[in-house]
Amino acid sequence: MAKLIKTLLVANRGEIAKRIFKTCKKEGVKTIAIYSSVDANSNYIQEADISVFLKGENPIQCHLDSSQIIKIAKKYGADAIHPGYGFLSENASFAKKCNEENILFVGPDPNSIELMGDKDKARRLVKELGIPILPGYENSKEKETKLLSEAKKIGFPILLKASAGGGGKGMRTVSKESDFLSALNEVRREAKNVFGDDRVIIEKYIESGRHIEVQILGDNTGKILHLFERECTIQRRYQKIIEETPSKILDNQLRKQMVDCAIQIGKKLGYKSLGTVEFIYDNKTKNFFFLEVNTRIQVEHPVTEEITGIDLVDLQLKIAQGEKINLNQDDIVSKGYAIEARLYAENPASNFLPTSGKIYKLKFPKVKGIRIDSDLKSGDLVNIYFDPMLAKLIAYDTNREKAINKLKYALSKIVLLGPVTNIVLLQNILSSNSFVNGKYDTNFIFENKEMIVNEKDKLIVDNMCIAATLYRWSKRNLRKKILKHLTSGWRNNFYSYQTEKFYFDGNHIICKYKIVNGDFIFSFNKTNYNVSIIRARGNIIHAEINGVLKKYHIKEIDKSIYIHSIDIGNNILEVAERYPTNEKEKDEKGYISPMPSLVVDVFVKKGDKIKRNQSLMVLSSMKMENTLYSNEDGVIDYVNVAKGENIQAGHVLLKIKQ
């Protein structure tokens, strides 16, 4: 044993830090958490034995400050640092600094990280092994004209990828020659901002592909093992949202070919620790190609843990401290089926723009066979600095059909009153016949855009308005100071209706109701409902609507009513003003920031003539860049932001006049 880990610092945050602490507690390892100003109330720092504040104004830069992190590790006696995923997890220089300071880095050696973190070098190494790789071009230091020439040789569509990239960042698909240069500049800029390296590689884009990855493990004796595959084909913005194992597309022969290639790469590297070898499978040719190696624990590692029963973090710690892993390939058995869904704070209907704000109520279901990895609680703030992933829900069962059904049920039971999320999209994917039958590719969401629309039928919208009205009525009734014997809203005219007005999904809804013998009659355009309040306590309403008992979680904040039930999911109603205001309506020609953002670049100025779909500026939020495009031809009337400026939600960015 090289060095026993008695104290471990986790150079990360959120759910992965909490996950690592869980294993450390089991193994009797003292833990140190680090946190920035925005995480002062986060759960994960309560899980650690010691929590240390990171100095610095920018929360992301704090977590990338390797010198400060190593100083903290030394000051508090850490034997090792676990980087988690993201941040410094694949930073070879950080791993070297740890070694130089006699601190164990829980991950592979710096040479492996450096080699596999550079996609140029990784492609060359794999090519030498005779493993199939996609046609491509690595020498991105060439002039733009040369790169365009190479792209034409490869043949459009092509994929541009940041050489130092990962996690879906710094990637663009280019379908035609005329879009190449603008996409190249976008990728270079994003790569520079996110990874500090603007090198780009060009690869052939597989138009109908499946994303398959193999989990490998290298111990201190040179042994390389695999822990089977994970399929991560369901993606948006090149980022995974659903992962499963075993893959429905692989038969035993194809699986063996893939894992053999992965093990071959691991042996060539002399790999020690966990790693993931990623492949793309071409549905048309039935061939697979190497993509990259991730030299860290993956976000989706829980599905592998579920089918193998092996604690992957525990293996990482044991290898880091020099232990021999007493596992042979035959000892690692895949049992059952596991599927993971990533819950994101984002609005799929608005091009997956991240959302932010306070979570007023959060309640995850407790279901046998459902594992939930999250660091959120009621009252937490979803900020703009980090990745918008809120939680991972992992379902395990004896077969795929049962696990999918269990995951769908768990998603329906999540109470999340706050920012818009992708729950409905996840439910729609899991309910799709194509997904259930295993007939899909990486374009699945793009080609099934109806899945991202959160349309509600009239019955559901009526029920939402009824529940919101009952909630508001109950609150008013409790606040009554005089004439308490009279029901709130009492009228001396038996036939007189009270009215509530709401907005939902851009539609104005008038909800009429009256109280007869203690019960309610609701009316929506000649559709009537007989309603009784069974129980109203706090933020929960139990109501009987046309003979069906329903439970609603409700919270009203500043005229927004956040509401959940198992049949309607999580939704937001806006209370319409009882009386009209004198405020002028927003100018439809103004472009408004949907959330707090950093202005990465501005491409236009006052007086510029523009065309429809022309790029205007780039905004960055939650580690994601979003390019703003024009909706029409016109002339820039004014620009209200500058490059490098931080702006708030609702900020007017620019205005176009025709």
Image (tube, grey):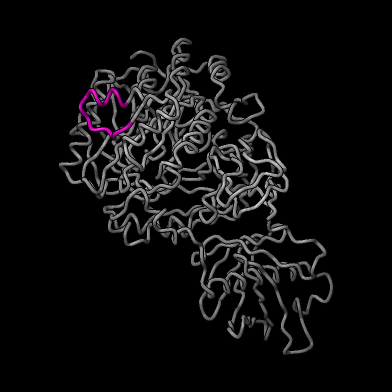
Q: Could you tell me which residue is drawn at 63 percent across and 49 percent down? A: 594
Q: Nearer the viewer, residue 99 or 503?
A: 503
Q: Is residue 288 above or below residue 449?
A: above
- Residue 213, by quadrant, is top left
Q: Report whether 435 appears left or right of 531.
A: left
Q: Residue at x 31, y 59 (%)?
A: 434
Classify residue 117 by image quadrant: top left
What span is in magenta? 123-136
Q: Position of residue 225 (x, y in %)?
A: 24, 29
Q: Quadrant of residue 403?
A: bottom left
Q: Position of residue 60 (x, y in %)?
A: 58, 30
At horizontal 75% and vertical 61% (from top left) the residue drawn is 585
Q: Is residue 505 left or right of residue 216?
A: right
Image height check: is 90 above or below 635? above
Q: Nearer the viewer, residue 530 or 97?
A: 97
As drawn, 561 above or below 68: below
Task: Decide if residue 212 is in sight here.
Answer: yes
Name the image quarter holding the N terminus: top left
Query: In the image, is residue 168 part of the stretch drawn in magenta?
Result: no
The C terminus, quarter of image: bottom right
